[in-house]
Image (cartoon, grey):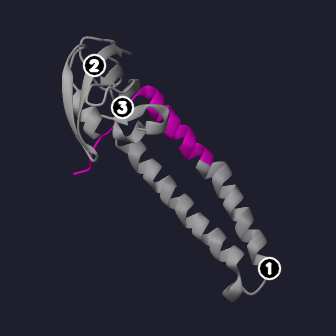
Amino acid sequence: MAQDVILTHEGLKELQEKLDYLKSVGRKETAEKIKVALSFGDLSENAEYDEAKSEQGKLEAEIQELETMISRAKIMEEDNSTETIHIGSVVTIKETTRGAQERVFQITGFAQANPAEGKISDESPVGKALMGHKVGDKVVVEAPRGEMTYKIVKISV
C-alpha cells in the first residue's frame, strides 16, 4: 500500500509549482539542449547528446516522483497548539550532551524536509524523538554520531 505524503498547504503549493516549472521550462530547456546536440552530427561519439538525454531522463524521473507525491498528498490540519510538538511546530532545542548552542527546527513531513532550511522530518531521528514532547522535556536521540540529549526550550507555530 502506498504511503501518504504528509504536507502543509504551503508544502503542497511548493511541490505543484516545482512540477509546473519542470513540465514547462525544464522540458523546453532539455529539448533545446537535445536539439543543439543533434546538430553536432554523429550520435555515436556525441557527448553533448548523451549528456542531454541523461538530463532528460533525470528530469522525467523527477517529474514522475513529484506527480506521485502530489497524488498521495495528505494535507495536515493546521494545529496552532504550542503545548506539544507536532508536525508544523517550530521547535527551539539545546543539546545538553555537549553544551552546544540552541538550534531551531520546523517539524515537517518527509516530503518537505530540508535540513539546510531548518526543516526536519517527523521520521528523522531528532524529529521522531521530539514528537509529542513539551517545553522543558529532555529527549534522547540515537543518531549516527552517538546518543545525544536535547532539552526543548520553546515551541511555536
User: Label 3 near label 2: C-beta < 8 Å?
Assistant: no
Mark 3 is on which residue type? Thr
Residue span colored magenta: 1-21
Answer yes or no: is residue 80 visible: yes
At which x and y percent is residue 15? 49, 39
Identified at 22% across, 36% down, the residue is: 141
What secondary structure is the stretch in magenta mostly built from? helix
- Give the Cα distance between marks 1 and 2: 60 Å
Q: Label 2 neighbourhood size at 10 Å, few (<14), some (14-19), many (20+)?
A: many
The residue tagged 2 is 152
- Mark 2 or mark 1, which is nearer the start of the sequence? 1
At which x and y percent is residue 106? 39, 26
Q: Residue extending furthest right? A: 39
Q: Quadrant of residue 95?
A: top left
Identified at 70% across, 69% down, the residue is: 34
Identified at 44% across, 31% down, the residue is: 118
The residue tagged 1 is 40
Q: Is residue 69 above or below residue 103?
A: below
The residue tagged 3 is 108
Mark 2 is on which residue type? Ile
At which x and y percent is residue 21? 62, 45
Q: Nearer the viewer, mark 1 or mark 2?
A: 2
Q: Quadrant of residue 100?
A: top left
Which element type, helix, strand or loop, lies under badge 1?
Answer: loop
Quadrant location, the C terminus: top left
Answer yes or no: is residue 89 visible: no
- Give the Cα distance between marks 3 and 1: 47 Å
Q: Residue extending furthest front? A: 98
Q: Is residue 58 above or below residue 122?
A: below
- Mark 1 or mark 3, which is nearer the start of the sequence? 1
